[in-house]
Image: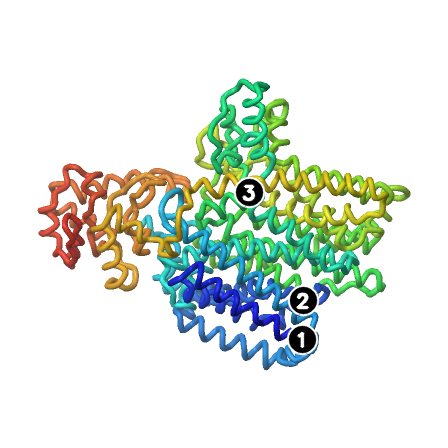
């Protein structure tokens, strides 16, 4: 066991070789996550007591959820500010409560006596650290916080670092609070404050952390499914975990094989005469509706795309909360199935098992991180609860009654915890509607759906055939009773995934998207969760099916087919990772690129970050989304009158205020009326006016002489200036 600890000095050496100057912040970041996990390990061990690793890797997320939510709720009530000292106070209190008041030190002593368990802890922590180092190295090849929606995500992170009380202000509409699900960025602001590392580095460490949690939690969840099925061979347990982990974090679908391998090969041998385009890593995501073009353009999301892209975005942040929620469901299911088999009477209707308590806490966190995931996983919870109650109450009406009671409790309590967020949030969407449905009759669309979902459906169908071919015989009510806990878990998540997939074809949430993209956002949010659910199932199903006794010939053939299907899904990263032009390690500093393309603005931004505390308003040029406009607010966290216009339109559901502010900012820069400019600056309580290359580009009639009458220059570098507005 003690020799195994040598893994960590070896990994530290690897970090030095790969990350160089970034080794120290990476190790500090990892140690912070390790400490949080260690503090909450007694809680996790109680929840995941039936897991072979006692849910060790989940302890980091359990700890983060509890700590960040307590601080968030206290900050929302203006009891405790979002300061670094507040975080340390909560950590000390957590140690005192868990390890002493709740006798966690006794659990710790017992765990130290179990060598196999300690080895599992060491190996899983080493895996976590290794993946963190490797993905940090990958991010260091292209660390720029620039392009796509990185400005938006970085703006939220920097804005939250300046926030004293929740909710944060809207950095792109001065004077208003953020009307967005910001909790994911808040969590990483929490870790940034805890570690004391600059956000220009923690942004990339956050992306590495997302990938690491996606990989390690998927590994733990799937490996424990195999363990709970009764298989004790370490090789099978590890293999199942690795299959799901690689598929979820790096896997794609059949698209890469068909369009990057098969069609080019057929073209070369003269069997295909169509056009062959250069394959790009975004192609599978926007495949339906663009190849060929139609009036129903979709985004079919999968985690590997987001990990490679590098946007610290809501839907990819929430994946580790989703995996933790699924882990809690498995622990809950395992306990109840064991109680049913032992004929233990059910808990009283008002009781709240620890797994339910954590799910009640996780659901509002998921809402505030990626709102779509709240209804999705509340429905998943209800389906699991119904499945358990159908077994416990032999398909009687009591099953439905107790499902309604217990799911109602979870709904009410989770919404109650969510109240401080909902008070300040306005829904910008326009309700749920039916899709056109005509796409379901298109052979092309069905073919495209097979390309996207073919390999997952292959495993789901195999699972249904091999697992249920004997158990469907006789009375259907006895079918569930025959299933092991892992088989029941996989059956239920496959049903949930299929239901979500079908639901996204029938319903959509209306927003401000263009007519030919009317359901793109709905499909984007839902299909990511379908992908997660299916990929957890695939690793388990592959091992479960392969382990069924049969002739050696049949087993070899089946094993070969399973391997080939997985390989086809894993082709994606070989095309995707080289697409963003990996060259050499540049470091984890995500804003150094500004020095090259906007050198004077870069110096001005550094000056603002170092010299301007709190959250005063700064005015800068207004521009469209996905451009370099709003660079000052994004890189400093300061609020501006108006940032990315289309994003604000999406968040608010109306363009009226955006159009008005666009003209007001133009008046400040180009207007001749000094009094009107002063009124506008006072209206939005502007403290600084930024004048750089983009302002000169956006406002060719710019009246710079007027600014000297409005305030004084506090920073100057060539053509870039910052004016402090006179009080």
| Residue 400 seen from this side | no
CA–CA distance in space, label 1 to label 2: 10 Å
> Dividing the picture into quarters, in which one does residue 557 lie?
top right
Pointer 2: what residue? 54
Q: Is residue 141 rendered to the left or right of residue 105?
A: left
Regarding mark 3 in the picture, which secondary structure is present there? loop
**Dots 1 and 2: beta carbons under 8 Å?**
yes
Front residue (pair 473, 291): 291
Badge 2 local density, few (<14 within 10 Å), some, or many (20+)?
many
**Dots 3 and 2: beta carbons under 8 Å?**
no
Q: Is residue 298 above or below residue 182?
A: above
**Residue drawn where x is 24% and y is 39% of the image:** 663
CA–CA distance in space, label 1 to label 3: 37 Å
Q: Earlier in the sequence, mark 1 or mark 3?
A: 1
Front residue (pair 379, 334): 334
Pointer 3: what residue? 302
**Residue drawn where x is 66% and y is 56% of the image:** 221
Front residue (pair 725, 696): 696
Q: Earlier in the sequence, mark 3 or mark 2?
A: 2
Regarding mark 1 in the picture, which secondary structure is present there? helix
Q: Locate residue 613, reporting x and y percent.
A: 27, 64
**Residue drawn where x is 40% and y is 70% of the image:** 84
Q: Is residue 543 rendered to the left or right of residue 568?
A: right
Q: Locate residue 456, reporting x and y percent.
A: 66, 40
Q: Locate residue 108, reporting x and y percent.
A: 64, 77
Quarter of the C terminus within the rendering = bottom left
Pointer 1: what residue? 111
Q: Earlier in the sequence, mark 1 or mark 2?
A: 2
């Amino acid at each position: 066991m003690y020799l195994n600890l040598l893994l960590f000095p070896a990994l530290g050496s690897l970090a030095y070789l790969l990350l160089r100057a970034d080794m120290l912040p990476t190790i500090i970041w990892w140690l912070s996550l390790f400490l949080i996990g260690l503090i909450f390990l007694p809680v996790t061990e109680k929840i995941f007591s039936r897991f072979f690793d006692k849910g060790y890797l989940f302890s980091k997320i359990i700890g983060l959820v509890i700590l960040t939510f307590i601080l968030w709720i206290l900050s929302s009530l203006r009891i405790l500010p979002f300061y670094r000292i507040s975080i340390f106070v909560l950590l000390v209190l957590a140690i005192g409560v868990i390890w002493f008041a709740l006798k966690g030190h006794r659990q710790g002593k017992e765990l130290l006596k179990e060598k196999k368990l300690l080895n599992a802890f060491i190996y899983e922590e080493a895996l976590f650290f290794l993946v963190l180092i490797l993905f940090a190295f990958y991010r260091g090849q292209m660390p720029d916080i620039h392009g796509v929606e990185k400005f938006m995500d970085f703006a939220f992170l920097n804005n939250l670092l300046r926030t004293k009380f929740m909710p944060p202000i809207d950095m792109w509409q001065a004077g208003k609070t953020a009307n967005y699900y910001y909790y994911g960025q808040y969590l990483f602001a929490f870790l940034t404050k805890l570690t004391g590392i600059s956000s220009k580095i923690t942004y990339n460490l956050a992306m590495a952390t997302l990938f690491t949690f996606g990989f390690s939690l998927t590994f733990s969840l799937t490996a424990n499914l195999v363990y709970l099925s009764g298989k004790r061979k370490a090789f099978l347990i590890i293999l199942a975990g690795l299959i799901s982990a690689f598929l979820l974090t790096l896997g794609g679908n059949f698209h890469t094989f068909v369009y990057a391998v098969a069609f080019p090969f057929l073209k070369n041998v003269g069997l295909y005469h169509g056009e062959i385009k250069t394959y790009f890593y975004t192609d599978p995501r926007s495949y339906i509706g663009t190849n060929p073009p139609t009036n129903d353009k979709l985004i079919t999301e999968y985690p590997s795309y987001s990990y490679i892209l590098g946007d610290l975005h809501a839907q990819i942040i929430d994946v580790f909360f989703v995996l933790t929620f699924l882990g809690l469901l498995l622990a809950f299911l395992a306990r109840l199935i064991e109680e049913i088999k032992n004929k233990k009477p059910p808990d009283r209707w008002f009781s709240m098992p620890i797994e339910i308590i954590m799910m009640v806490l996780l659901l509002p966190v998921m809402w505030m991180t990626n709102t779509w995931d709240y209804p999705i996983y509340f429905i998943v919870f209800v389906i699991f609860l119904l499945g358990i109650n159908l077994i416990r109450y032999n398909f009687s009406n009591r099953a439905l009654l107790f499902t309604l009671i217990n799911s109602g409790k979870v709904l009410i309590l989770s919404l109650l915890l969510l109240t401080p967020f909902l008070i300040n949030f306005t829904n910008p969407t326009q309700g749920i509607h039916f899709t056109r449905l005509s796409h379901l009759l298109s052979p092309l669309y069905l073919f495209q759906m097979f390309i996207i979902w073919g390999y997952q459906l292959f495993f789901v169908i195999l699972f249904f055939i091999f697992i249920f071919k004997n158990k469907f015989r006789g009375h259907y009510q006895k079918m569930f009773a025959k299933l092991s806990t892992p088989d029941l878990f996989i059956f239920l998540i496959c049903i949930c995934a299929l239901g979500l997939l079908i639901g996204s074809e029938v319903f959509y949430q209306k927003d401000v998207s263009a007519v030919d993209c009317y359901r793109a956002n709905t499909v984007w949010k839902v299909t990511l969760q379908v992908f997660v659910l299916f990929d957890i199932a695939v690793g388990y199903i592959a091992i479960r099916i392969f382990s069924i006794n049969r002739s050696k010939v049949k087993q070899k053939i089946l094993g070969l087919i399973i391997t080939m299907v997985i390989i086809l899904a894993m082709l994606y990263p070989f095309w995707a990772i080289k697409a963003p032009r990996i060259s050499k390690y540049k470091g984890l500093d995500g804003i150094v690129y500004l020095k090259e393309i906007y050198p004077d603005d870069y110096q001005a931004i550094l000056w603002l970050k170092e010299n301007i505390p709190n959250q005063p308003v700064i005015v800068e040029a207004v521009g469209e989304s996905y451009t370099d406009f709003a660079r000052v607010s994004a890189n400093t966290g300061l609020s501006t009158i108006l940032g990315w216009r289309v994003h604000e339109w999406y968040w608010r559901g109306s363009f009226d205020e955006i159009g008005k502010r666009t003209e007001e900012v133009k008046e400040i820069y180009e207007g001749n009326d000094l009094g009107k400019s002063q009124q506008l600056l006072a209206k939005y309580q502007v403290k600084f006016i930024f004048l750089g290359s983009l302002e000169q580009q956006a406002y060719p009639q710019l009246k710079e002489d007027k600014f000297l009458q409005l305030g004084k220059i506090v920073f100057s570098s060539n053509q870039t200036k910052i004016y402090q507005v006179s009080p």
